[in-house]
């Protein structure tokens, strides 16, 4: 490897802009004992070109001990000792250059002290009628007994309300709420058999038993519903300023409070959307858009598969504004996003798994040429 090539790879690594192939090329070279002299020289030259934070502390003994006992990169003790000794030598050359010290310890360019940016998982909070909160995780398998004898089965990332005899129920309407945090999702089967999937940073509030009355729930965020059919017992969803009347159907609601508009997308059946004194009857494949402020209900033809991408485990963007894309990523990865450029008029195309490593996701988005990204102090920085 030439000196110029090595200098380029090191600098791009520090800026979190290496491709996967370049990352592997650099790691292979750094692991070669014969590369030590050139690597030392280039790291010294690179250190002279970088700005050093005034409050930076030189990597200490504890950090080296952590490297020395890390089995991820070396298969035997002799190799690990060699890496430890080599890192001691390198650290003396790059005092104040923390990003280069991360070369072997963290492959993806994130410091050990920083918060890891991970994909979302199945997690939620169930709030009972008495205010008690029950934390739910994907691996849990338990039964929760509610007031009036009702029971809830929690298993495999979902909550199922079991039918209860009417004699055990009181006349008092008891409501539960399931809330997912940023970086969470969950599934719910309501007492009437209706199925609900909650995206990140979302919630649904519902009665423990619907009785013979109209079935009413309220949602915040994004929820996909498959409503159980019950003749003469309509299903109503309240989402901000929008009310949706349902008669046995499958539809998606996106109603985050911070968004300028809420969307109701019909996949199957029939729904009526009411807002601002207006109403619209939707057909399958149509989406009703309701703004937070007064205005007409806008109806568009949409790709249902794209709308439901989140439920099926992936992101799907079709000429979507950059800011909306980054909002979805921010919610799912529970990470803040900052802009070092004007995102107006920037749009993205692409489909990618929601379980991707954040670095892989951002690299895929960069292929659209709409923007570049870097991770700094646990935040995503969006750049030209």
Image: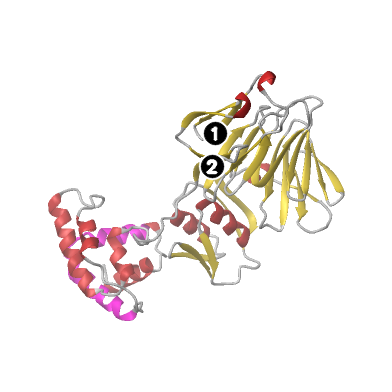
- Nearest the eye: 382 or 186: 186
Judge the density around disc 2: few (<14), some (14-19), many (≥20) Cα neighbours within 10 Å. many
Q: Is residue 381 left or right of residue 166?
A: left
In reply to whether residue 48 is colored magenta, the answer given is: yes
In reply to whether residue 72 is colored magenta, the answer given is: no
Q: Is residue 344 left or right of residue 292?
A: left
Q: Check the image and name the residue furthest to the right.
A: 277
Q: In the image, residue 280 lies at what x, y percent?
A: 84, 44
Query: What residue appears at the point 22 percent right and 74 percent down from the top-left corner?
Result: 93
Q: In the image, residue 21 lies at what x, y percent?
A: 37, 57
Q: Is residue 281 visible?
A: yes
Where disc 1 sits, the SS reads strand
Q: In the image, residue 56 lies at what x, y percent?
A: 32, 74
Q: Is residue 313 visible?
A: no
Report the residue marked by disc 1: 158
Q: Is residue 70 left or right of residue 294?
A: left
Camera-near label (2 vs 1) is 2
Q: What colour scheme governs how the chains and residues are painted in the rendered image of this protein?
A: secondary structure
Where disc 2 sits, the SS reads strand
Query: What residue appears at the point 50 percent right and 53 percent down from the top-left corner?
Result: 333
How far is disc 2 from disc 1 in space, using C-alphas?
10 Å
Q: Main secondary structure of the magenta part?
A: helix
Q: Which residues are magenta?
A: 21-49
Q: Give the number of the disc on residue 124.
A: 2
> Number of labelled discs?
2
Comes first in the chain, label 2 or label 1:
2
- Nearest the eye: 280 or 359: 280
Judge the density around disc 1: few (<14), some (14-19), many (≥20) Cα neighbours within 10 Å. many
């Amino acid at each position: 490897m030439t000196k110029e090539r090595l200098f380029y790879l090191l600098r791009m690594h520090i800026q979190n802009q290496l491709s996967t192939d370049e990352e592997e090329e650099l790691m292979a070279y750094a692991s070669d004992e014969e590369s030590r002299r050139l690597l030392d020289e280039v790291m010294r030259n690179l250190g002279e070109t970088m700005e050093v934070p005034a409050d930076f502390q030189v990597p200490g003994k504890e950090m080296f001990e952590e490297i020395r006992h890390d089995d991820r990169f070396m298969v035997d003790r002799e190799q690990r000792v060699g890496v430890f000794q080599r890192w001691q030598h390198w650290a003396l050359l790059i005092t104040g250059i923390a990003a280069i010290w991360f070369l072997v310890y963290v492959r993806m360019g994130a410091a050990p002290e920083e918060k890891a940016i991970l994909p979302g998982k199945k997690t939620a909070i169930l709030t009972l009628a008495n205010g008690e909160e029950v934390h739910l995780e994907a691996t849990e398998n338990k039964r929760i007994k509610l007031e009036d004898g009702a029971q809830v089965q929690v298993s495999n990332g979902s909550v199922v309300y079991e039918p209860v005899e009417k004699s055990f129920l009181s006349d008092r309407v008891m409501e539960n709420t399931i809330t997912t945090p940023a970086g969470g999702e969950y599934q719910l089967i309501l007492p009437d058999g209706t199925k609900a999937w909650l995206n990140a940073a979302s919630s649904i509030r519902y009665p423990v038993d619907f009785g013979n009355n109209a079935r009413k729930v309220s949602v915040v965020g994004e929820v996909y519903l498959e409503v159980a059919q019950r003749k003469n017992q309509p299903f109503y969803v309240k989402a901000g300023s929008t009310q949706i009347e349902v008669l046995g159907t499958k539809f998606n609601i996106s109603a985050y409070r911070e968004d300028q508009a809420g969307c109701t997308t019909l996949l199957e059946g029939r729904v009526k959307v009411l807002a601002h004194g207006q109403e619209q009857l939707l057909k399958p494949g149509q989406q009703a858009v309701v703004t937070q402020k007064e205005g007409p209900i806008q109806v568009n033809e949409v790709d249902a598969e794209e709308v439901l991408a989140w439920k099926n485990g992936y992101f799907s963007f079709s000429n979507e504004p950059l800011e909306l894309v980054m909002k979805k990523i921010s919610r799912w990865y529970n990470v803040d996003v900052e802009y070092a450029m004007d995102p107006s008029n920037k749009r993205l195309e692409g489909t990618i798994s929601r379980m991707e490593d954040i670095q892989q996701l951002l690299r895929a988005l960069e292929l659209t040429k709409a923007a570049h990204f870097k991770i700094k102090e646990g935040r995503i920085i969006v750049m030209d």
